[in-house]
């Protein structure tokens, strides 16, 4: 009789734990998959053509479902990739990113509001070259599915422009445009 | 990208300002001070003002404290001018000059390397070695060149420092930082200015007092190139040693005539510094081709 009571109590507690824990699990942030995410930038060279580059080392967390949505992205400055080693060395130097002094570029959201079906307005702080500036971007949910391991994944994309001079990157403004276009495409899944 | 504007701002402006301040400074005070003091006190001020104006015309006024660590080179100029001028006027004894060079080197190294400590990676062991070596070599280089400066004319010293600074500028550009290269170019232009002023003033010896400010800024540039850009430690060491090569030439050419000796000294300094240019160019060409 006593054993039966203990077994029932244990079942009740474990059920309650699963039920209570379930919302917390669904609110867990999705982790950015660095392999299937891309951060591209585009800058105009000598007011003539656009040069493209990317950052290969991306990490971050996305949480758009619960009541306190958040988005955090970090890029390693040292992972800049333009397809030319000498140009990358120049971009990492104090002329531009000063990668040794400022090894990380980060974005942290301060407010996320749903602006439409699968669309969000994300306000936040972009920290680049040691300077923090508030920015607002339109984030679009590009799809959802499952990866090869059966884990649920979601995709997001945003395109926005910044002025590099706002972040103290003022060198060679006559040769490389002040305005830089960024395309951020994220694939995220549960860890 | 180098434009005619860059050439004007980074070479003509510092050269002219250095030469004018040095010439006016000497002529304005030669009656009140002894000839040697009046020649030397304006040296650090002329080099400092020339370098700062060149930097300002190239990159504009930096905010304080500067965002980018390499901008400390501009602000370093001011305490170095004060230190150099005090040394010139008060004629520090040897231990006083040594203390001044240690203080200047430590200040430069601290300001130029402290941001690395606060990064996630912290100060890496190899970077710490480069920084410590930079401070030691700076003090050694100041002592060595000050000792050389009292044995040669101001014009010859300027030519020796110029012969090292121009290749340093080229190496820094080839090592991935045009900004540091242009800054080294402005420093080189100050030596062209002291050379021009020395030629105008005849036998005016501006020499020793300019060594501290030049060497600390030169060392700071090489340190920044090593730590924040792609300057190799070997090339930095070659450029560091280059101006000191004048000692060797001085020893070897003692039996030469009056004009061959300075030519040999400057040529040896330039030849050693050009080894670094050659190495940097070779590396640049290989990387561009690959």
Image (tube, coloured by chain):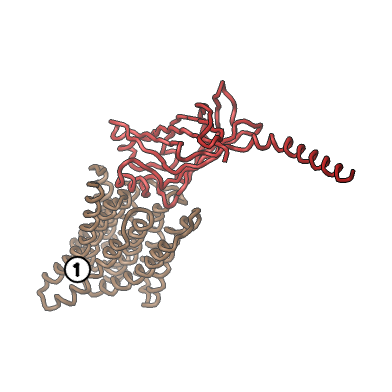
Chain colours: A red, B brown
Measuring from the top left, give residue B226's x and y in whole percent. 35, 58
A46 left or right of A189? left
Measuring from the top left, give residue B196's x and y in whole percent. 20, 59
Residue in front for this viewpoint, B176 or B162 = B176
Label 1 packing within 10 angstroms: few (<14), some (14-19), many (20+): few
Q: Tell me, yes or no, if residue B223 can be seen here.
A: yes
Label 1 marks a residue whose chain is: B
The image quadrant where one finds the N terminus of chain A is: top right
Label 1 SS = loop
Residue in front for this viewpoint, A145 or A2 = A2
Residue in front for this viewpoint, B42 or A33 = A33
Residue in front for this viewpoint, B251 or B204 = B251
A145 left or right of B202? right
Q: Quadrant of residue B36?
A: bottom left
Instruction: Reply above or below: A179 against A103.
Output: above
Residue that carries the numbered disc 1 in the rendered image:
B203
B16 left or right of A112? left
Considering every residue shown, the one lying at the far right of the view is A1
- Residue positioned 37% across, 72% down in the render: B90
Q: Tell me, yes or no, if residue B20 can be seen here.
A: no
The image quadrant where one finds the C terminus of chain A is: top right
- Residue positioned 56% across, 21% down in the render: A117
Considering every residue shown, the one lying at the far top of the view is A117
Instruction: Reply above or below: B160 against A165.
Output: below
- Residue positioned 83% across, 40% down in the render: A8
Measuring from the top left, give residue B242's x and y in whole percent. 24, 66
Q: Quadrant of residue B149?
A: bottom left
Measuring from the top left, give residue B124's x and y in whole percent. 45, 60
In this rendering, the count of numbered labels is 1
């Amino acid at each position: 009789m006593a054993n039966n009571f203990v077994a029932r109590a244990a079942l009740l507690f474990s059920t309650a734990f699963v039920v209570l824990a379930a919302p917390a699990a669904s609110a867990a942030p999705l982790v950015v998959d660095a392999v299937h995410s891309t951060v591209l930038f585009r800058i105009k060279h000598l007011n003539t053509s656009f040069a493209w580059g990317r950052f290969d080392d991306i990490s971050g967390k996305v949480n758009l479902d619960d009541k306190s949505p958040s988005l955090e992205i970090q890029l390693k400055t040292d992972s800049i990739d333009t397809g030319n080693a000498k140009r990358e060395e120049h971009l990492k130097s104090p002329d531009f990113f000063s990668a040794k002094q400022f090894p990380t570029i980060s974005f942290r959201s301060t407010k996320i509001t749903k602006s439409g079906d699968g669309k969000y307005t994300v306000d936040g702080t972009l920290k680049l070259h040691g300077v923090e500036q508030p920015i607002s971007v339109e984030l679009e949910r590009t799809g959802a599915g499952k990866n090869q391991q059966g884990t649920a994944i979601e995709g997001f994309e945003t395109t926005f422009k910044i002025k590099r001079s706002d972040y103290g990157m003022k060198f060679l403004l006559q040769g490389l445009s002040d305005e830089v276009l960024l395309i951020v495409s994220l694939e995220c899944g549960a860890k | 990208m180098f434009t005619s504007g860059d050439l004007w701002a980074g070479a003509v402006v510092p050269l002219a300002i250095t030469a004018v301040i040095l010439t006016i400074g000497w002529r304005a005070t030669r009656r009140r001070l002894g000839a040697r003091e009046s020649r030397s006190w304006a040296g650090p001020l002329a080099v400092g003002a020339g370098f700062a104006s060149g930097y300002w015309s190239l990159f504009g006024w930096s905010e304080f404290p500067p965002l980018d660590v390499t901008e400390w080179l501009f602000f370093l100029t001011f305490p170095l001018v004060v230190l150099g001028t005090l040394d010139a006027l008060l004629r520090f004894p040897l231990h006083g000059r040594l203390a001044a060079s240690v203080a200047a080197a430590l200040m430069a190294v601290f300001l130029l390397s402290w941001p690395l400590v606060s990064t996630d990676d912290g100060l890496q062991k190899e970077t710490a070695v480069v920084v410590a070596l930079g401070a030691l070599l700076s003090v050694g280089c100041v002592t060595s060149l000050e000792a050389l400066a009292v044995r040669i004319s101001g014009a010859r010293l300027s030519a020796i420092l110029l012969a090292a600074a121009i290749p340093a500028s080229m190496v820094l550009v080839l090592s991935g930082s045009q900004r540091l290269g242009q800054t080294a170019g402005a420093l080189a232009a100050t030596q062209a200015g002291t050379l021009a002023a020395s030629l105008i003033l005849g036998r005016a010896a501006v020499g020793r007092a300019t060594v501290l400010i030049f060497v600390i800024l030169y060392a700071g540039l090489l340190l920044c190139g090593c730590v924040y850009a792609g300057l190799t430690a070997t090339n930095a060491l070659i450029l560091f040693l280059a101006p000191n090569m004048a000692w060797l030439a001085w020893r070897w050419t003692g039996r030469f005539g009056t004009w061959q000796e300075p030519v040999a000294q400057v040529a040896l300094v330039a030849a050693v510094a050009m080894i670094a240019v050659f190495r940097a160019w070779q590396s640049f060409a290989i990387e561009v081709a690959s």
